[in-house]
Amino acid sequence: MTTDTTSSKPWFQKHRYIIPMVLVLLAIIGQFPGSSEPEAPATLAISDIKDMSGFDEENNDYYWGATFRITELDPMTKVNCTVKAIDANGGVLIEETYEGNTLNEGTIIKYGEDGLTSTTKEIVEAISTFDVSCTKK
């Protein structure tokens, strides 16, 4: 006479609900792939950065800004850009974030009617370089 004890059964028969629970868990996980955080947009390659800072005699005002190009985009592509004016020691003097638009040759312009941003003579004279980053909208 043989008796059927729980120790003689295979592991999957001892706990008959384990496999269905694992399958349910895998189905739930499969419904939400990558749900932890949204993927950050890729930063675009910036080239031909030029300093456009100066003095506006008509308005008696100093302004700062930079022009630059993103050649990998089609014309009229909207981008979000951050431009930082950097001093000789690598410190950020001033920064601006704005929505830009791509022209035919890749030059980025501010979208809308805003022009160059007003600032002080000291900041304009201290600008050594620019740090520019953009992402496609």
Image (spheres, grey):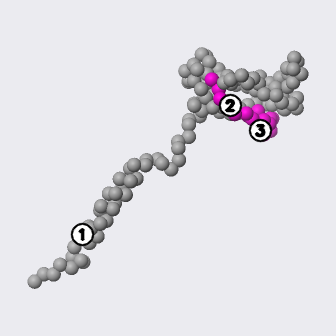
Which badge, 2 or 1, is on the more N-terminal residue? 1
The N terminus - image quarter: bottom left
Q: What residue type is labelled 1?
A: Gln
How far is the residue under mark 2 from the one under mark 3? 17 Å
Residue 11, by quadrant, is bottom left
- Is residue 97 rendered magenta in the image? yes
Which badge, 2 or 3, is on the more N-terminal residue? 3
The C terminus - image quarter: top right
Asked if residue 68 can be seen in this view, the reply is no
- In percent of the image, x 60 and y 16: which residue is there? 104
Residue furthest left as drawn:
1
- In percent of the image, x 55 and y 21: which residue is there? 74
Q: In this image, 13 relative to 111: left or right?
A: left
| Percent position of residue 21, x then y | 33, 62
- SS at badge 3: strand
Q: In this image, 17 relative to 51: left or right?
A: left
Q: Which mark is residue 13?
A: 1
Kindly report which numbered mark, 2 or 1, lies closer to the viewer in this rendering.
Answer: 2
Q: What residue type is labelled 3?
A: Val
Which badge, 3 or 1, is on the more N-terminal residue? 1
| Percent position of residue 55, x then y | 85, 22
- In percent of the image, x 38 and y 50: which residue is there? 30
Q: What stretch is highlighted in magenta?
A: 84-101
Q: Would you place residue 48 above or below residue 14 in this image?
A: above
Q: Would you place residue 38 above or below residue 58 in this image?
A: below
| Percent position of residue 39, x then y | 53, 42
Q: Which mark is residue 98?
A: 2
Q: How many labels does the image show?
A: 3
Q: How would you rate the neighbour count of disc 1 (Cα within 10 Å): few for under 14, some for 14-19, many for 20 or more?
A: few
Residue where numbered disc 3 is placed? 92
